[in-house]
Image (cartoon, rainbow, N blue to C red):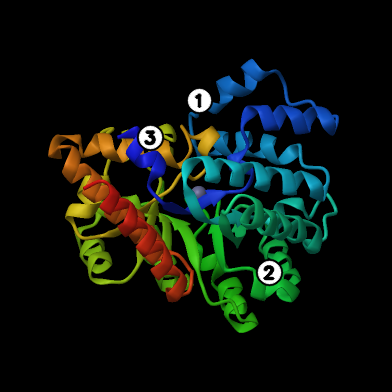
C-alpha cells in the first residue's frame, strides 16, 4: 500500500508554508539568522504534544520567527516542493500569510516574489506545479489583514485565491466579510476558509453565509449537524480534510470519541479531499495522511481501498482552483497509473 500511495499522482489544497518546515530546516535557518529557538529535543517535544490550538499557534510562530530575509521564504517553499517531488504531489495550492511579516518590515513584494520564484524553479527543476493562496489570519487585526489584501493588488493575477486561518472560537467569520467582499471587488475569484475544525457547525454556516466560499478547510464538525450534512452533500462545496492534523490537535478525541471521520464523511456524500495542513508539526506529509486513510478502509480489502484512494486523488484535482483543461491532464495521469495496477 505504501508503494501504491507513493506513486499515486496527488495534489494537496490545504498546506501552510511555514508549517512545512522540518526541524532540520528550522534549526538551519535559526542558526543562519542568529535566532535562538531552543534545542532539537525541545522543538521535537513541542511538535508532538499540543494541549490546545493556541499552543499549536505558539509552535507555528517559532517557525515564523526564524524568517528574516525573503530568501528564507524561498528556501522554505523550495524544500517543501522537493518533498512534493518525492511524494508524487504533482500540484499544490499553498497558503501563505504575508500579514505575519508586516511587523518585521517585509513589503508584500518581498514575501510573494520569492514564493513565485520557488514555484517557477520547482516546476522547471522538479516537475512540481503550484499556486499560492493569500491567507488572512483571524487573530490579527482586521486593518493588518486588509492591508495585506490591498498590498497584493499588483500580484492578484499570480495569486490563485484567498483564504483565512487561525483560531475559530471567538473569531467569527462574519468579522471578515468586508475583506472577502473587497477581494471580490479587486478581482479575486477563488475563495476558501478554515472552519469547522474546533468551531461547531454554526461556525461553518457563518463562514458559508458571510464569506461565500466554495471550499472549507477542515469542516469535519459539520457531522455534528445532520441538516448541515445534507446541505453540504447537496452542494458543490468541498472540504479540505487533514486526517493527521485532526488526530494530533485532538479534534477527533474531543468531538468524535477519538475515531477518524473520513469514512463517515464519504458515506454521507460530502465532497472531501485529503491534505497535510502543517505536516512536520502534525504527524506527517501527504503520503502519511493517505496511508491513514488506507488504514481506515483496510476492512474493505486492498483493491477497494485503492479504488477509494484513486477517487480521492482525482477529487482533489477537481476541488482545486486549476482550470478544467489542466485538471483533465491530471485525471489522465491518475487513470494511466490505475491501469498499470491491473
Ligand atoms: Zn490549516
Q: Is residue 124 left or right of residue 253?
A: right
Image coords of residue 312 (percent x, y)? 31, 54
Name the residue located 36 percent from the left edge and 63 percent from the top edge: 331
Q: Is tag 1's residue or tag 3's residue first in the polypeptide sequence?
A: 1
Q: Indicate whether 30 appears above or below 234.
A: above
Q: Indicate whether 300 appears above or below 332.
A: above
Name the residue located 81 percent from the left edge and 58 percent from the top edge: 110
Q: Indicate whether 230 appears above or below 188.
A: above
The residue that disc 2 covers is 149
Along the line of sight, the residue nearer the viewer: 154 or 259: 154
Q: Is residue 232 left or right of residue 88?
A: left
The residue that disc 1 covers is 48
Q: How many residues crowd around disc 1 within 10 Å: few (fewer than 14), some, or many (20 or more)?
A: some
Check whether the beta carbons of the residues at disc 2 and disc 1 lie within 8 A of each other: no
Check whether the beta carbons of the residues at disc 1 and disc 3 lie within 8 A of each other: no
Q: Is tag 2's residue or tag 1's residue first in the polypeptide sequence?
A: 1
Give me the disc on residue 247: 3
Name the residue located 26 percent from the left edge and 60 percent from the top edge: 270
* Count of all numbered marks drawn on residues in the image: 3
Q: Is residue 119 left or right of residue 217?
A: right
| Cα distance in 3D space between marks 2 and 3 | 32 Å
Image coords of residue 240 (percent x, y)? 40, 55
- Image quadrant containing the N terminus: top left
Q: How many residues crowd around disc 3 within 10 Å: few (fewer than 14), some, or many (20 or more)?
A: some
Residue 254 makes an appearance in the image: no
Which image quarter: residue 7? Answer: top left
Ligand 1 within 8 A of label 1's CB?
Answer: no
Along the line of sight, the residue nearer the viewer: 213 or 290: 290
Amino acid at each position: 500500500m505504501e508503494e501504491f500511495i507513493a506513486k499515486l499522482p496527488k495534489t494537496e489544497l490545504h498546506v501552510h508554508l511555514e508549517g512545512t518546515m522540518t526541524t532540520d530546516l528550522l534549526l538551519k535557518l535559526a542558526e543562519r539568522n542568529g535566532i535562538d529557538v531552543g534545542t532539537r529535543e525541545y522543538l521535537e517535544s513541542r511538535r508532538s504534544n499540543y494541549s490546545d490550538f493556541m499552543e499549536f499557534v505558539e509552535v507555528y510562530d517559532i517557525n515564523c520567527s526564524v524568517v528574516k530575509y525573503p530568501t528564507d521564504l524561498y528556501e522554505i517553499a523550495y524544500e517543501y516542493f522537493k518533498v512534493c517531488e518525492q511524494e508524487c504531489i504533482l500540484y499544490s495550492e499553498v497558503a501563505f500569510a504575508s500579514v505575519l511579516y508586516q511587523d518585521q518590515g517585509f513589503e508584500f513584494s518581498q514575501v510573494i516574489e520569492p514564493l513565485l520564484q520557488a514555484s517557477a524553479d520547482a516546476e522547471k527543476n522538479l516537475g512540481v506545479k503550484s499556486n499560492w493562496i493569500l491567507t488572512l489570519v483571524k487573530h490579527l487585526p482586521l486593518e493588518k489583514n486588509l492591508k495585506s489584501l490591498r498590498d497584493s493588488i499588483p500580484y492578484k493575477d499570480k495569486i490563485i485565491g484567498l483564504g483565512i486561518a487561525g483560531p475559530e472560537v471567538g473569531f467569527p467569520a462574519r468579522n471578515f466579510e468586508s475583506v472577502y467582499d473587497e477581494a471580490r471587488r479587486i478581482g479575486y475569484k477563488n475563495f476558501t476558509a478554515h472552519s469547522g475544525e474546533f468551531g461547531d457547525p454554526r461556525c461553518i454556516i457563518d463562514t458559508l453565509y458571510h464569506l461565500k466560499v466554495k471550499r472549507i478547510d477542515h469542516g469535519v464538525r459539520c457531522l455534528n449537524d445532520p441538516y448541515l450534512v445534507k446541505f453540504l452533500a447537496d452542494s458543490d462545496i468541498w472540504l479540505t480534510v487533514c486526517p493527521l492534523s485532526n488526530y494530533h490537535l485532538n479534534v477527533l478525541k474531543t468531538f468524535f470519541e477519538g475515531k477518524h471521520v473520513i469514512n463517515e464523511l464519504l458515506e454521507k456524500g460530502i465532497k472531501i479531499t485529503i491534505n497535510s495542513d502543517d505536516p512536520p508539526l502534525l504527524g506527517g506529509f501527504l503520503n502519511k495522511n493517505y496511508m491513514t486513510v488506507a488504514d481506515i478502509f483496510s476492512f474493505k480489502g486492498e483493491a477497494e481501498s485503492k479504488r477509494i484512494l484513486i477517487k480521492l486523488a482525482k477529487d482533489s484535482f477537481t476541488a482545486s482552483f486549476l482550470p478544467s483543461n489542466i485538471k483533465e491532464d491530471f485525471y489522465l495521469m491518475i487513470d494511466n497509473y490505475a491501469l498499470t495496477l491491473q
